[in-house]
């Protein structure tokens, strides 16, 4: 049964979508069956992988206007399927209010398909609304990207409080998958201090790898490619490759021997 992981942070601009897309694509390249759910109205996870929502998206599935199976798109990347999202999801925040089981609609949708995947990753909106509550109610765990800046610590505190409320009301088994330090600049004292504080407060929950500030990571989505395809030898690609390996190890999965330590090549894209 596939594990459902919400990639969430109430603060925007922390590398949430970058992490969701690149981790999903890399897990697919490591022979995992992955579904990426783009629950953010900005739709950046969808466009960043070279896709578009079209007539059917996760929006239609949430509102029972179409079955989820008709809203999935095979991505160009090995092992990765996407439930696209777009601006229509902004309206879903209002439209879900009066629907039955409004906090559990995504959970119902994903429970019907989770057997088909090893991992289901959900890219959440950078806010606490019904879409994020749906994601946290459906998830087994939460992966939390944190930018290495002062205000990120305040956002983390708020998110932890939200997780506790969701555990108490909707999903008692929700756990923290891990905390990922992003946009790390080792040349600044602030980045180092924030990293040390996060590790001190969340012992054992912080990933060993940190994601560096990288121009190439910012460029890759405009080309519709994950970083390990756009620039396999960049610092960002190397960091996300290490994250994928650590993620699999934490979840008791073996890395294929012929894939371990290798940079996936552009030929992994389906023609």
Image (spheres, rainbow, N blue to C red):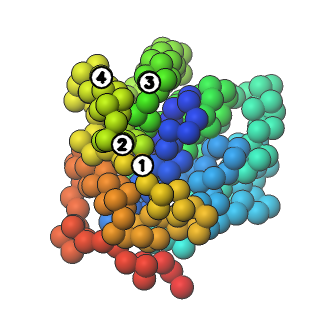
Residue with the mark numbered 4: 197
Marks 2 and 4, the one that precedes in the sequence:
2
Q: Where is residue 146? Give x, y as percent.
A: 43, 34
**Dot 2 or dot 3, earlier in sequence:** 3
Q: Are marks 1 and 3 in contact (CB under 8 Å)?
A: no
Q: Of the numbered discs in the image, which one, if any, rests on residue 150? A: 3
Front residue (pair 168, 75): 75
Disc 3 element: helix
Nearest to the observer: residue 66 or residue 74: 74
Alpha-carbon span between mark 2 and mark 3:
13 Å
State the SS at label 1: loop
**Does the rendering let one see residue 89?**
yes
What mark, if any, has residue 213 been given in the picture? Answer: 1
Q: Residue at x 27, y 46 (%)?
A: 209
Label 2 neighbour load within 10 Å: few <14, some 14-19, many 20+: some
Q: Kindly check if marks 1 and 4 are in contact, taking CB atoms under 8 A apart as contact.
A: no
| Image location (x, y in percent) of residue 163 | 47, 22
Question: Horizontally, is 236 left or right of 98 in the view?
Answer: left
The residue tagged 2 is 185
Assess whether mark 2 and mark 1 are in contact (beta carbons under 8 angstroms): yes
Relative placement, left or right, of 22 versus 90 is left
At x 80%, y 30%, the residue is: 94
Image vertical order of residue 265 relative to residue 131, above or below: below
Work out whether mark 4 precedes mark 3 in sequence or the reverse, and give the earlier one: 3
């Amino acid at each position: 049964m596939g594990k459902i992981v919400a990639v969430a942070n109430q603060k925007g601009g922390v590398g949430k979508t970058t992490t969701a897309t690149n981790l999903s694509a890399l897990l697919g390249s490591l022979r995992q069956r992955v579904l990426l759910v783009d629950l953010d109205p900005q739709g950046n996870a969808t466009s960043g992988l070279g896709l578009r929502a079209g007539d059917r998206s996760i929006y239609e599935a949430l509102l029972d206007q179409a079955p989820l199976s008709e809203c999935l798109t095979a991505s160009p990347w090995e092992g990765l399927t996407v439930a696209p999202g777009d601006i229509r999801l902004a309206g879903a925040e209002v439209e879900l209010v009066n629907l039955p089981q409004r906090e559990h609609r995504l959970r119902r949708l994903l429970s019907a398909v989770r057997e088909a995947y090893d991992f289901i990753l959900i890219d959440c909106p950078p806010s606490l609304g019904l879409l994020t509550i749906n994601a946290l109610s459906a998830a087994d765990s939460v992966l939390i990207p944190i930018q290495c800046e002062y205000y990120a610590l305040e956002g983390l505190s708020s998110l932890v409080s939200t997780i506790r409320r969701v555990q108490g009301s909707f999903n008692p088994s929700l756990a923290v998958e891990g905390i990922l330090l992003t946009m790390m600049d080792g040349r600044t004292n602030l980045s180092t201090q924030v990293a040390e504080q996060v590790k001190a407060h969340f012992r054992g929950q912080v990933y060993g790898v940190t994601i560096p500030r990288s121009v190439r990571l910012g460029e890759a989505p405009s080309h519709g490619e994950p970083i390990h395809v756009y620039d396999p030898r960049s610092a960002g690609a190397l960091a996300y490759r290490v994250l994928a390996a650590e993620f699999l190890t934490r979840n008791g999965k073996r890395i294929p021997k012929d894939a371990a330590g290798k940079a996936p090549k552009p030929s992994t894209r389906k023609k």
